Image (spheres, rainbow, N blue to C red):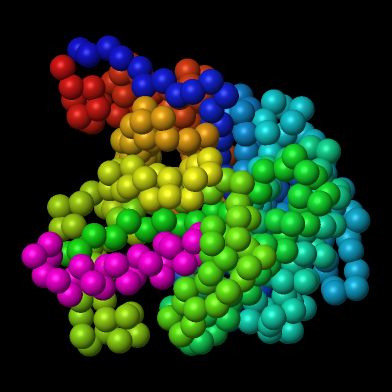
């Protein structure tokens, strides 16, 4: 049996990622809570409810599980509607709770990365038009300043906005996130204002904390033409990828927002990322379809032979991870894998998915590409937005009724990776033997 270890650079970040609305529970003042109350919006009519009961204090035991598993960092988000429940009021108790959480992380030996916007918005902001309203950049900057002033003694790595491309596409094109619109013009306004909001937040953070590292997390969706010989498939793949993968990130590089209905200058956004976060899950085959004007004349599928997750939501395509990192290199800043994982309640696919994707991250590191960390999605099963509780991404299983945590085998696998700062042949032989020959050929 081949014996080798794919080691990562000293100081590499190993952690898991979470989001406030998905784990805290009891968030009743934001757009997602309101969305959950509308019939037909969430699969099976499910609600976040207590979620993982972090607001009730169970964050501490979950953090301890992460620390015991050798993780040296954790990515979490703060809930805007808790901190600023109305435009003219700040909740100091909520700010103190987040301060307690990030302090605890540092005391447990884990560096906090704080995401300032992870899909959820206060109801008062939505009443003002949400991210369609040009004033939102100023509202967001004010909120960010208050959070950074409170947490800066323990946090120096900030993600301003998680997956702005997903937020805009799902809420304003597909209509499955709040506010449920299918309006390309609204999508363009939201994307433009999110770029402005990020730029304002970036400059505010650096004014308060010059040594801070500030970036965004982009959902990179690998896309390849379904038929390599068919030029329209190549064309529509390029268009889809440029709009979905490129538009936001390139605006932070050169200050231009390139959208379906407009090309706008946002000069203040140029050069406003100290790192780029890459969230990678899967790869699509893209084919041209003249009947699908609402989908930019495209149809997206998975390879017929691809290994699919439990609900068919994710195809296991590890080569797309390498492609995602290669894509991120164009921005000439450090790269962090801010999310990667698979929904798998039985924990059968997750071990090989993890092994195969980490091997692709190592490939990139071995080319001296500036990959600085990896955050697995997620620490514990949580409320997966419009898909409710139907998908289980956690290393730890959650019993929603009892709040009990049950350890999956992948907990020990990821812990071994974190402690070794690498992926060894022995680990793969124990946890994912079916891909051993692929990853460690004789």
State which region is magenta.
Answer: 227-250
Could you say where residue 304 lies in the image, as x and y percent from the top left?
15, 58
356 to 297, vertically: above or below:
above
Q: Is residue 81 visible?
A: yes
Could you say where residue 200 lies in the image, as x and y percent from the top left?
72, 64
**Image quadrant assignment for residue 367:** top left
Q: Which residue is at 34% across, 70% downward?
A: 240
Report the label total: 0
Q: Which residue is at 74% across, 57% downward?
A: 203
**Direction from residue 440 to residue 120 in the image, left or right:** right
28 to 207, vertically: above or below:
below
**Direction from residue 67 to residue 318 in the image, left or right:** left
Q: Which residue is at 56% across, 35% downward?
A: 15
Residue lying farthest to the left in this orientation:
229
* Overall secondary structure of the magenta section: helix
108 to 185, vertically: above or below:
above
Taking the magenta stretch, the answer to whether it contains residue 412 is no
Taking the magenta stretch, the answer to whether it contains residue 237 is yes
- Quarter of the image that includes the N terminus: top left
- Quarter of the image that includes the C terminus: top left
Q: Which residue is at 33% across, 42% downward?
A: 322
Could you say where residue 282 lies in the image, as x and y percent from the top left?
34, 53
Could you say where residue 230 lies in the image, as x and y percent from the top left?
11, 70
Q: Is residue 287 visible?
A: no
**Direction from residue 149 to residue 144 in the image, left or right:** left
113 to 197, vertically: above or below:
above
């Amino acid at each position: 049996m081949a014996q080798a270890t794919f080691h990562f650079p000293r100081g590499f970040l190993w952690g898991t990622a979470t989001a406030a609305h998905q784990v805290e529970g009891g968030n009743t003042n934001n757009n997602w809570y309101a969305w959950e109350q509308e019939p037909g919006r969430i699969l099976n009519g499910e609600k976040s409810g207590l979620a993982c009961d972090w607001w009730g204090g169970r964050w501490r035991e979950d953090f301890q599980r992460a620390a015991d598993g050798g993780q040296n960092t954790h990515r979490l988000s703060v809930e805007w509607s808790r901190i600023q429940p109305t435009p003219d009021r700040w909740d100091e108790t909520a700010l103190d709770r987040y301060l307690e959480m990030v302090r605890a992380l540092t005391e447990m030996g884990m560096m906090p990365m704080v995401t300032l916007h992870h899909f959820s918005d206060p109801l008062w902001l939505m009443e003002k038009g949400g991210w369609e309203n040009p004033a939102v950049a100023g509202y967001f900057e004010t909120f960010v300043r208050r959070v950074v002033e409170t947490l800066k003694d323990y946090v120096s790595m900030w993600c301003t906005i998680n997956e702005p491309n997903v937020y805009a596409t799902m809420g304003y094109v597909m209509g499955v996130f709040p506010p449920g619109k299918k309006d390309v013009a609204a999508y363009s306004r939201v994307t433009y204002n999110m770029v402005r909001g990020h730029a304002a937040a970036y400059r505010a953070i650096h004014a308060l904390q010059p040594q801070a590292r500030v970036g965004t997390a982009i959902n990179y969706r690998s896309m390849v033409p379904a038929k390599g010989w068919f030029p329209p498939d190549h064309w529509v793949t390029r268009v889809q990828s440029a709009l979905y993968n490129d538009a936001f990130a390139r605006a932070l590089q050169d200050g231009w927002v390139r959208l379906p209905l407009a090309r706008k200058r946002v000069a203040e956004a140029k050069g406003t990322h100290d790192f780029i976060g890459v969230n990678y899950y899967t790869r699509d085959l893209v084919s041209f379809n003249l009947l699908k004007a609402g989908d930019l004349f495209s149809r997206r599928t998975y390879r017929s032979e691809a290994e699919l997750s439990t609900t068919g939501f994710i195809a296991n395509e590890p080569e797309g991870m390498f492609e995602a990192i290669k894509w991120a290199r164009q921005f000439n800043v450090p790269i962090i894998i801010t999310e990667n994982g698979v929904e798998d309640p039985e924990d059968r696919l997750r071990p090989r998915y993890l092994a195969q994707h980490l091997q692709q991250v190592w490939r990139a590191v071995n080319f001296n590409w500036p990959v600085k960390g990896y955050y697995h999605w997620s620490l514990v099963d949580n409320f997966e937005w419009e898909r409710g509780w139907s998908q289980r991404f956690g290393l730890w299983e959650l019993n929603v009724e009892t709040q009990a945590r049950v350890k999956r085998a992948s907990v020990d696998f990821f812990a071994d990776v974190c402690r070794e700062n690498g992926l060894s042949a022995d680990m793969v032989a124990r946890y994912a033997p079916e891909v051993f020959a692929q990853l460690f050929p004789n």
